[in-house]
Amino acid sequence: MIVVVERLRTAWQLVREMAGERDYENYLAHQAAHHPGEPVLGERAFWRERSDRQERNAAHRCC
């Protein structure tokens, strides 16, 4: 039973990663590791900046 739960948890993390839901968590980890002491964006500002960046760079869109 524990193995099944762990596999489901791993699969869920993979789905979240593929959907981009972990981007803010990854951003925070990167900032902490590579830019300690520098201010970080709040979650709302992060998603707004990410969305704006995607709009400016149309080559990364599928449609």
Image (spheres, grey):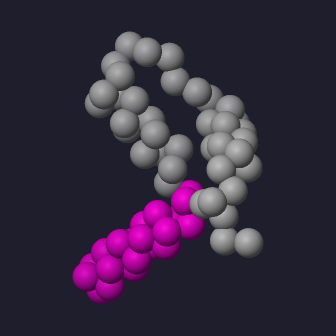
Q: Is residue 11 above or below residue 23?
A: below
Q: Residue furthest top?
A: 37
Quarter of the image for the N terminus: give it: bottom left
Q: Residue at x 29, y 30 (%)?
A: 33
Q: Residue at x 68, y 32 (%)?
A: 45
Quarter of the image for the C terminus: give it: bottom right
Q: Nearer the viewer, residue 49 or 60?
A: 60
| Residue interval drawn in magenta | 1-21
The answer to which quarter of the image holds residue 35 is top left
Q: Residue at x 26, y 82 (%)?
A: 3
Q: Is residue 59 above or below residue 3?
A: above
Number of numbered tags placed on the structure image: 0
Q: Is residue 49 above or below residue 20?
A: above
Image position of 16 (left or right of 52):
left
In this rendering, does residue 51 appear at all? Answer: no
Q: Position of residue 62 (x, y in %)?
A: 66, 71
Q: Main secondary structure of the magenta part?
A: helix
The stretch drawn in magenta includes residue 8:
yes
Image position of 29 (left or right of 21):
left
Q: Position of residue 23 (x, y in %)?
A: 51, 50
Q: Residue furthest left?
A: 3
Q: Position of residue 39 (x, y in %)?
A: 50, 17
The answer to which quarter of the image holds residue 8 is bottom left
Q: Residue at x 43, y 67 (%)?
A: 13
Q: Position of residue 38 (x, y in %)?
A: 43, 15
In this rendering, does residue 55 appear at all? Answer: yes
Q: Residue furthest front?
A: 59
Q: Nearer the viewer, residue 39 or 55?
A: 55
Q: Is residue 13 above or below residue 1?
A: above
The stretch drawn in magenta includes residue 55:
no
